[in-house]
Amino acid sequence: MPMLFVPGFTQTPSSWDGVRAHLDRSDTKALAVPERDSFAATVDALAETGGAGAWCGYSMGGRLALAIALAHPHLVRKLVLVSATAGLADAAERRDRVEADEQLAGTIERDGTAAFLGRWLAQPMFADVPADAPGVRDRAAATPAALAHALRTLGTGSMPSMWDRLGELAMPVLVVTGRADAKYTQIGDAMTERITGARRAQLACGHAVPLVQPAELAARLHDFTKPPASSNDTTS
């Protein structure tokens, strides 16, 4: 079963290189998030590009992978959500987030990519990310227009809340967060409670699990996606 990886905001497919290095790379593919006019259109385009397999998304990529699992369940054999959320259930919170993201998009267009990334990666949630983590330098190639577009179309406020639909997920699901990421640990616990049979994993890091704990995350993915033991297997 191929494993399909979706990166987070500001990231490129190379952000998954550290994780993929500990897996069979011939059976994995890191996807670029296509630029479309809406969250739903992006979900459809990404699903078409990736096809069927085990989908794993981080942060924004996790929200997209979750949406693909709900809109195109026949393509998602297994689902891994890393530091992700099902959105904002409260309409007022969504409006506030859209407004905040619009302001942030404006600063990116005004100040440029380098200035924005300097501020973005300086946030406490990324404090444990190594300076040489995979994909960190690649982010600098993103244009201000592309980053601003992602905020406006793929931000948590722009997407529909999927909290009430989590019970629809019929495929195996693994929810992963970093123990030092209090906000997403709480979100991950809440999501796990709503997804029938979901597995839960917490690793020793903050928000950016794939960049800080690539080997440990890869081990969890390997265990989660490996085929079940045959009923004919015997042990000595």
Image (cartoon, grey):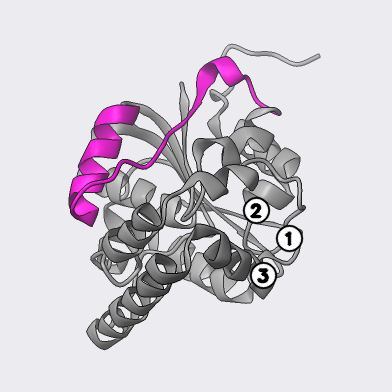
Q: Which residue is mark 1?
A: 205
Residue 115 is left or right of residue 18, and the answer is: left
State the residue in front, 109 or 181. 109
The circle drawn on residue 122 is: 3
Query: Where on the picture, by quarter, is residue 99?
Result: bottom left
Q: Nearer the viewer, mark 3 or mark 2?
A: 3
Indicate the amino acid at tag 3: Ala
| Residue 205 visible in the shown view | yes
State the residue in front, 58 or 185. 58
Indicate the amino acid at tag 2: Val
User: Do the CB atoms of the residues marked 3 and 2 lie less than 8 Å apart?
Assistant: no
Q: Secondary structure at mark 3?
A: loop
Tell me which numbered mark, 3 or 2, is placed earlier along the sequence. Answer: 3
Q: Is residue 97 above or below residue 44?
A: below
Residue at mark 3 to residue at mark 2: CA–CA distance: 16 Å
Q: Secondary structure at mark 1?
A: loop
State the residue in front, 104 or 234. 104
Where residue 176 sits: x, y (%)? 58, 54
- Residue at x-position 35% and y-position 68%: 156
- Residue at x-position 29% and y-position 31%: 75
Tell me which numbered mark, 3 or 1, is placed earlier along the sequence. Answer: 3
Q: Secondary structure at mark 2?
A: helix
- Residue at x-position 50% and y-position 59%: 113
Where residue 229 sits: x, y (%)? 59, 21
- Residue at x-position 73% and y-position 43%: 216
Q: Which residues are magenta?
A: 22-50
User: Do the CB atoms of the residues marked 1 and 2 lie less than 8 Å apart?
Assistant: yes
| Residue 72 visible in the shown view | no
Q: Which residue is mark 2?
A: 209
Q: Please tell me how crowded label 1 is: few (under 14), some (14-19), or many (20+) other residues with Cα within 10 Å.
A: many
Any magenta on residue 41? yes
Query: Where on the picture, by quarter, is residue 23?
Result: top right
